[in-house]
Image (spheres, rainbow, N blue to C red):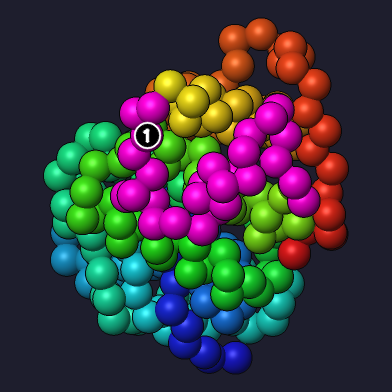
């Protein structure tokens, strides 16, 4: 089967001498693992398609669902150059991609998750991340994956909770003491969820302040799936 789909590279790893294995989050097929041949050659034509958080239309050949597919070509839509030139933006982009890879199952489409990641990368390409960027992305991904909370916890106000879930990431720039306290509580919710759900920590957690140094987290927050992971 040969098909094309828009996708964003979440992860890459060298394979054999000249190839790469990538994890790609696609618009219509969800997360899939693919081989991109020849990218480590000096004249590798598909190298740009294998770079982290590259957004492109990928042409894919797959013999059967049980066999890893192969990228045979594609057309770059966006490489987010400003992210690649800024360490803070790049770290946040890699964190978002790692979260997508770890919290989404293979081959279960979710256009909402694809749009969420694309929105995050687009905003990061335009401005530096605020301290609220990582927890806001995590909370929204939790909701899209069926792990969201129906109501705010830890006395977070409904309005603050709404803003963390709905407003543009770049607008989440808080300075009032009450808002900063609520932001810390949102980070607590994210830490507890990730500590409970993941078998081992994300590689990009600690630089962003979402990894707890002590387990379990002191405050009791119930994070119960509201739906099966989709």
Magenta region includes residue 169: yes
Q: Which residue is mark 1?
A: 174
In the picture, measured across the screen, residue 144 lies left or right of residue 96, that is right
Classify mark 1: helix, strand or loop. Answer: loop
Q: Indicate the quadrant where residue 36 lies.
A: bottom left
What residue is rendered at 52% in x and 77% in y?
27
Specify few, some or many for label 1: CA neighbours under 10 Å numbering under 14, 14-19, or 20 or more.
Answer: some
Q: Quadrant of the C terminus?
A: bottom right
Seen in the picture, residue 178 relative to 224 is either above or below; the reply is above
Q: Is residue 43 above or below residue 84?
A: below
* Nearer to the camera, 72 or 155: 155
Q: Which residues are magenta?
A: 150-176
Give coordinates of residue 226: x percent, y percent.
Answer: 83, 54
Which quadrant would the N terminus be assigned to in this image? bottom right
Q: Quadrant of residue 174?
A: top left
User: Residue 78: where, in percent of width, then height?
Assistant: 25, 69
């Amino acid at each position: 089967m040969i098909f094309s789909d828009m996708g964003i590279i979440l992860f890459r790893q060298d394979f054999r001498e000249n190839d790469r294995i990538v994890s790609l989050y696609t618009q219509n097929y969800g997360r899939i693992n693919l081989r991109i041949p020849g990218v480590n050659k000096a004249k590798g034509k598909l190298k740009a398609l294998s770079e982290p958080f590259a957004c492109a239309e990928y042409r894919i050949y797959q013999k059967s669902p049980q066999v890893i597919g192969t990228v045979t070509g594609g057309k770059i839509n966006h490489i987010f150059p400003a992210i690649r030139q800024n360490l803070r933006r790049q770290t946040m982009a890699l964190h978002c991609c790692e979260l997508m890879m770890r919290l989404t199952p293979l081959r279960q489409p979710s256009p909402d998750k694809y749009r969420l990641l694309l929105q995050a990368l687009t905003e990061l390409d335009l401005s530096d991340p605020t301290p609220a960027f990582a927890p806001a992305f995590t909370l929204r991904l939790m909701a899209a994956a069926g792990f969201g909370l129906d109501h705010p916890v830890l006395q977070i106000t409904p309005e603050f909770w709404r803003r963390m879930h709905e407003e543009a990431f770049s607008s989440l720039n808080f300075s009032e003491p009450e808002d900063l306290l609520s932001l810390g509580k949102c980070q607590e919710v994210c830490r507890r969820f990730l500590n409970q759900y993941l078998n081992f920590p994300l590689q990009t957690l600690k630089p962003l302040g979402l990894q707890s140094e002590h387990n379990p987290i002191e405050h009791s927050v119930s994070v119960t799936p509201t739906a099966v992971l989709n």
